[in-house]
Image (tube, coloured by chain):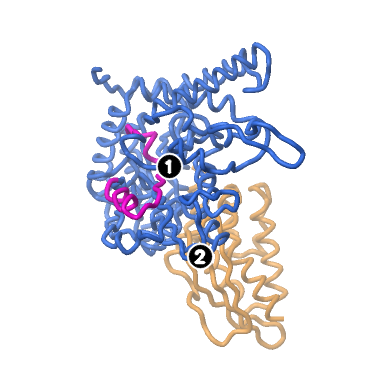
Chain colours: A orange, B blue
């Protein structure tokens, strides 16, 4: 069945064992995003370093496996990377999620986030996957 | 009258949608009737026939079709009035849905055009609802409080999921103008006791409204016997179509209330600077009403009456007992709401440890064809009360079978396996 392909092992692993969860100091910006249709929410902090490096992405929130795993994967991908690099990943991830399952994912750009490709087939769940990523984009913009 | 025998297999044949397959050949297991019910052929055909051979506008067209449509529309009012035991057909107002019925009543309070003392409302006056209400029985009253400066208060809910009436004397007082509560909770399944609330409401001279969206479709409800002042329900949860709801109110109250919407058919005479209004119910039915939907609702109450609401209630009681037992055996499953059958309807909401309801719903639907509702079910304050963001809700109706509950349980076992 299709949902089975949505609940990839990697997603379930991140849901059960979230990476980098919990809000940490110091931070440059904090944002709070909610998905009003399902009540999922996330608070995210970003700490940037010299030369546009992302020193830390910390978060807390509640919601379904997709939204929580997406935050965990984002933490792993973004921390230690640079702002331009991560924004490129956010753009590619957004393109994949909004592609109604018809977009070929660029695994080189997305890394582990490619596991969410199956979510794009479920329009009701796309917002779950994007919640943390949109929050991150917002937080980075506010850090600048 | 003898009790009609209840044969769920025969009833299911009346509902064509129940025999369809979902993509991938999955059978449909529809456990979302509390959200909206499915429709029997009798309703579908009555609406089709009306559109095919009788349709015209109601109340104003001076031709054969107009007369036939008007008769069918007003017939539906007679049927609904009889169905809920209304003392007069003129006490039945057709609205778009239960939300509109609730808004219509809220609009009558604290309204500068309404000087009737029962409806005056301002700072110092109070409105009382409960913590288990659907948003449609909260938000209109919040808006009313904001408009008038009145205070909104609410009955708390016990851990067991029942109304906490212990503080009723302090909650409902001489300052209270209106109390509006659910007859049956759309999340907990709890059937609320009308009598003690009504007794206190009468003592203090307030009015009582029931949101009966979840009770009227499922068991005999008689407004005269209940003795309340207002009652709202919706057609689509009662095997009828969407787009039509009902407000029942005592005639003298409807007479005192101002119109909610202005427009065609709700007037007596119009000048450029003023109007006089038609008597109830038409005063509250501005514009072309949902004609075909009313016909469908008439057919729906005919259908439910033929089956017998007592029989429907008995069937749902058996299903609820079966479901509470079967769900209770799942480790990590917690029912939110009464655990026994006392004053309880066929709606069972629950949480599953470690799995978010949206994931539960997705897997149930996609792999088992089991349709449940997940989320806060338009009752967010109730979920906040229980400290949870969401629940999974299975809700039953006259066409639900124990085999469908078995399918739900099998699905939940699988959900637990995926998230183990």
Mark 1–mark 2 CB contact (< 8 Å): no
- Identify the subunit bearing mark 2: B
Residue at image position (57%, 87%) is A26
Q: Tell which tag, 1 or 2, sits nearer the viewer.
A: 2
| Residue A39, image x, y percentages | 51, 60
Please check the rendered image and state whether residue B208 is part of the magenta-colored stretch, yes or no. yes
Which residue does the numbered mark 2 point to in the structure image?
Answer: B123
Q: SS for tag 2?
A: loop
Q: Nearer the viewer, residue B235 or B205?
A: B205
- Estimate how packed mark 1 is, as few (under 14), some (14 to 19) or many (20 or more) residues with alpha carbons within 10 Å: many
Q: Nearer the viewer, residue A122 or B271?
A: B271
User: What is the chain letter for disc 1?
Assistant: B
What residue do we see at 56% from left, 73% from top? A75
Q: What stretch of residues is rendered in magenta?
A: B195-222
Indicate the position of residue B272 as horizontal and vertical percent values.
Answer: 77, 39
- Disc 1/disc 2 C-alpha distance (Å): 23 Å
Please provide percent x and percent y for residue A33: 58, 67
- Left or right of B266? Residue B334 is left
The answer to whether any part of residue B368 appears in the image is no
Q: On the rendered structure, is A42 left or right of B338?
A: right
Give the residue at mark 1.
B230
State which tag comes first along the sequence, 1 or 2: 2
Q: Quadrant of residue B303?
A: top left
* Residue B19 shown in magenta: no
């Amino acid at each position: 069945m299709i949902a089975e392909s949505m609940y990839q092992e990697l997603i379930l692993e991140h849901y059960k064992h979230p990476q980098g969860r919990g809000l940490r100091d110091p931070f440059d910006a904090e944002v709070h995003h909610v998905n009003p249709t399902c009540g999922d929410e996330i608070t995210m902090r970003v700490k940037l370093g010299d030369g546009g490096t992302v020193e830390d992405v910390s978060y807390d929130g509640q919601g379904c496996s997709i939204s929580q795993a997406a935050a965990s994967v984002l933490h792993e991908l973004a921390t230690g990377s640079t702002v331009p690099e991560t924004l490129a990943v956010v753009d590619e991830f957004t393109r994949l999620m909004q592609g109604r399952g018809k977009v070929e994912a660029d695994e080189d750009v997305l890394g582990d986030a490619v596991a969410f490709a199956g979510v794009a087939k479920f329009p009701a769940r796309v917002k779950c996957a994007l919640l943390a990523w949109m929050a991150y984009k917002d937080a980075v913009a506010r850090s600048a | 009258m003898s009790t009609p025998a209840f044969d769920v297999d025969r009833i299911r044949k009346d509902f064509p949608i129940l025999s369809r397959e979902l993509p991938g050949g999955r059978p449909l297991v529809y456990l979302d009737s509390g959200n909206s019910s499915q429709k029997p052929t009798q309703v579908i055909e009555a609406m089709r026939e009306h559109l095919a051979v009788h349709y015209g506008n109601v109340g104003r067209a001076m031709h054969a079709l107009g007369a036939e449509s008007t008769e069918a529309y007003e017939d539906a009012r007679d049927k609904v009035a009889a169905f809920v035991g209304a003392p007069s057909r003129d006490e039945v107002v057709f609205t778009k849905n239960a939300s509109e019925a609730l808004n219509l009543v809220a609009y009558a309070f604290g309204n500068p055009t309404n000087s009737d003392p029962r409806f005056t409302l301002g700072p110092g006056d109070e409105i009382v609802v409960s913590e288990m209400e659907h948003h449609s029985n909260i938000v209109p009253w919040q808006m009313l409080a904001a408009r008038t400066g009145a205070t909104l208060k609410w009955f708390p809910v016990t851990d067991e999921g029942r109304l906490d009436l212990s503080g009723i004397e302090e909650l409902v007082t001489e300052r209270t103008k209106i109390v509006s509560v659910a007859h049956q909770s759309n999340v907990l399944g709890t059937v609320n006791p009308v009598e003690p609330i009504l007794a206190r409401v009468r003592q203090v001279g307030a009015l009582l409204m029931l949101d009966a969206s979840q009770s009227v479709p499922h068991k005999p409800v008689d407004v005269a016997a209940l003795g309340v002042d207002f009652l709202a329900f919706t057609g689509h949860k009662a095997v009828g179509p969407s787009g039509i709801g009902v407000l029942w109110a005592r005639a003298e109250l409807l007479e005192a209330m101002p119109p909610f919407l202005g427009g065609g058919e709700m007037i007596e005479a119009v000048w450029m600077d003023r109007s006089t209004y038609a008597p109830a119910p038409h005063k509250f039915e501005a514009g072309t009403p949902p004609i075909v939907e009313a016909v469908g609702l008439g057919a729906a109450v005919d259908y439910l009456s033929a089956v017998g609401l007592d029989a429907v209630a008995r069937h749902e009681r058996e299903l609820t007992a079966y479901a509470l037992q079967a769900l209770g055996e799942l480790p990590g499953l917690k029912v939110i709401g009464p655990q026994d059958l006392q004053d309880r309807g066929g709606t069972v909401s629950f949480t599953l440890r470690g799995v978010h309801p949206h994931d539960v719903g997705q897997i149930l639907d996609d792999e088992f064809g089991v349709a449940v509702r997940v989320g806060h079910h338009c009752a967010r304050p109730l979920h906040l009360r229980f400290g949870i963001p969401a629940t999974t809700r299975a809700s039953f109706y006259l066409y639900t079978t124990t085999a469908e509950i078995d399918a739900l349980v099998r699905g939940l076992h699988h959900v637990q396996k995926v998230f183990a």
